[in-house]
Amino acid sequence: MPTTTEDLLRALAPQVLGALVRRYGHFDTAEDAVQEALIAAAARWPEDGVPDAPRAWLIRVASRKLTDLLRSEQARQRREGVVAQRTLPEEWLAPAADHPARESDDTLVLLFLCGHPSLSPASQIALTLRAVGGLTTAEVARPFLVPEATMTRRITRAKQAIKDSGVPFRMPAGAERARRLGAVLHVLYLVFNEGYASTSGPRLHRTELADEAIRLARLVHRLLPDDSEATGLLALMLLTDARRSARTGPAGDLVPMAEQDRDLWDAGQIAEGIALITDALARGPTGPYQLQAAIAALHDEAPSVEATDWPQIAALYDLLLRVADNPVVALNRSVAVAMARGPRAGLDLLDGLAADDRIAGDHRLHAVRAHLLELEGDRAAARDCYREAARRATNPARQRHLLERAARLTDA
């Protein structure tokens, strides 16, 4: 549950946007209106208190803002003599009080709308991260490795494409829903990852994003209970999120899995995740989210790092690499191979990754190399790699952790 006004507003924002888009159909203008309503709430709620029905309050205020924006736009067009043959319907410009807020959560419909087939996969993901995940444009741009201005233009074009398509705001059915599902699942995966391991900012994780991704994954699973990949994604999130409480120390410092107190792991989430992935793997076909969930389950079931079934994890990464040509998968595979066969075997795999432009500059490559060099006993080289990884990392908590690892090796 949200614990602060900021957390509550972040959780409610996509629901309010979905409600407005359902009624008005103006994606871009609706988002502007929602942002104004959020600003008003952030200013008033700390002093006046949170309303009894905060979602309805936001929808009411945002609707008024939106009708004002639409009237202003129509007036501008009239002044400029460029009014279209069909003006805005009067129903759209009616006072917001005449239209009580719906009780349903339109976030899932908004999620599938952002996966509209008229958009490229990259635009689908970017728009959903912005509109549903609540990430800033800068945060959306980072994983795409493009400037913020470029991402702003991409998201703006995506909104316009949806508007021009005239697609109704409702859940797609049958084959259309199946076509959009891949983009929807990938978006939820990215939102969860940003929440669980923030790429920037003062916090190691952003709980509100991870929780929202899990909530949406549950909705998708409830909608499509027989889809093994939707089930696998939910299982992966639960099995990963189960370790959250043990990932940071009292001062917010990063605690690696090898050093975590496994008694702090959420046994309920682990049990639910294992039940979900067991069911999904039995039904098939097996996809990347199921394989990742199976790997996470092996980690969560092990009483210690030493007792982990590393050969089985390495074998699962071999399978995952066949269905997902992803350098991060290859990086994680190198760690599993090192744990199963020795650090030199893992380092040999890293040499090949160093030539992959998709990850060559990523701090994770240097951090893994440092870890494996430390395991091999080359403390000086490990120290240098830890420092290089810290230099490239963008999250302060992760930077501190890497520098601490380097400091431990300085006097060796």
Image (cartoon, grey):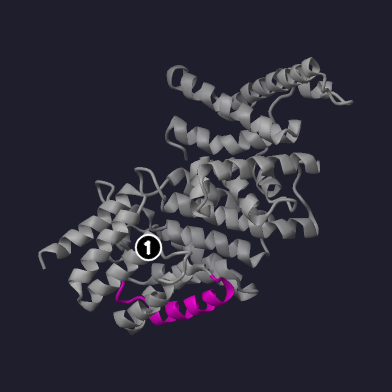
Residue farthest along the bottom direction in this orientation: 341
Q: Is residue 92 above or below residue 365?
A: above
Q: In which quadrant is the C terminus drawn? A: bottom left
Q: Magenta part of the protein: which range?
A: 304-325
Is residue 203 a member of the stretch shown in magenta? no
Q: Is residue 225 above or below residue 287?
A: above
Q: Quadrant of residue 158?
A: top right
Residue at which label 1 appears:
364
Principal SS element in the magenta part?
A: helix
Q: Amino acid at mark 1?
A: Arg
Q: Secondary structure at mark 1?
A: helix
Residue depicted at 42% across the width and 45% down the height: 206
Residue farthest along the right direction in this orientation: 85
Residue depicted at 10% across the width and 64% down the height: 411
Residue depicted at 56% across the width and 61% down the height: 233
Q: Is residue 368 above or below residue 351?
A: above
Residue 242: x %, y % from top left:
42, 58
Along the horizontal axis of the image, is 175 left or right of 96? right
Residue 409: x %, y % from top left:
16, 65
Residue 353: x %, y % from top left:
43, 72
